[in-house]
Image: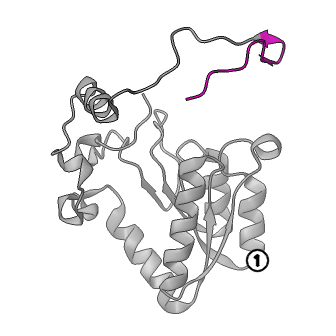
Amino acid sequence: MRSLPEGLTLRGKHLQWRDKPLHAQQPLQAWQGLLQTRGLQESDAFFSPQLSQLPNPLLMQDMEKSVQRVVTAVQTGEAIHIFGDFDCDGVSGTTILVEALLAAGATVTSSIPHRADDGHGIGVEPVKEAVAAGVGLGLSVDTGTTCFTACEEAKRLGLDLIITDHHLPDKHLPKAFALLNPAREDCGFSERKFCLPT
């Protein structure tokens, strides 16, 4: 990491190193120290994951009915719309899901809200637009657990909405077709050892 030039400012604040710049004289030793502080070793399964180590996804609450619904949509050519999120896991997850569904022969579209203009979550207008475009199945990525109004609107308009999310739910769950979220109190999938906010 390079040192900052003397007097460099960001938004009027003088920036300076609190400690010395990070330079690893022994990169391997630095790496091993980093692992050690996190209770990890290079031999841990974390560094050589295998599909066989993943838990059975059908053990997640609402997974079986979600899979059946997606399969039906793909087989019948029903239009599917992906409601993504604008952050890293939302964008990458949306891309992966769209590519996988296209590879399976699905008719699929997607949308990601604008952070400043639309804010977080699934909006009512995108739900209405999807239904107007003939979409019968909606899938969320990294959003939807607290999008009660959008879920109610989807249900009212006949859009089956499957929420896939990891954010902590409120006391009440949205009235969606399905809610795939290991943070649900009635789920506990894989002992909730997934990406959950703290």
Quarter of the N terminus within the rendering: top right
> Quick check: 12 left or right of 187?
right
| Render colour scheme | one colour
Locate residue 49: give its quadrant. bottom left
Q: Where does the image place residue 9, in percent across and percent down from the top left?
A: 79, 16
Which residue is rendered at x = 32% and y = 68% of the image? 64
Whether residue 131 is visible to the viewer of this picture, yes or no, is: yes
- Please report the bounds of the magenta region as a residue range: 1-13
Q: Nearer the viewer, residue 12 or 181?
A: 12
> Number of callouts in the render?
1
Quadrant position of the C terminus in the picture: top left
At a point 37% along the width and 41% down the height, the residue shown is: 183
Which quadrant holds residue 48? bottom left
Residue 19, percent from left and from top = 51, 9
Percent x, y of residue 71 = 43, 81
Q: Which residue is mark 1?
A: 133
Lateral position of residue 33 relative to residue 120, left or right: left
Task: State the image coordinates of residue 91 (x, y, percent, origin top left).
Answer: 60, 56
Dot 1: what SS? loop
Q: Nearer the viewer, residue 28 or 134?
A: 28
Relative to 12, 167 lies left or right: left
The residue type indicated by label 1 comes to Ala
Q: Residues within 10 Å of mark 1 (few under 14, many from 20)?
A: few
Up-down: is 195 above or below 34?
Answer: below
Answer whether residue 140 is visible to the viewer in this image. Answer: no
Q: Residue furthest left?
A: 43
* Residue appearing at x 36%, y 60% in the figure: 62
Vertical position of residue 46 compared to residue 69: above or below:
above
Vertical side of 64 occupied by 185: above or below: above
**Above-or-below relation of 175 to 167:** below
Magenta-span inclusion, residue 172:
no
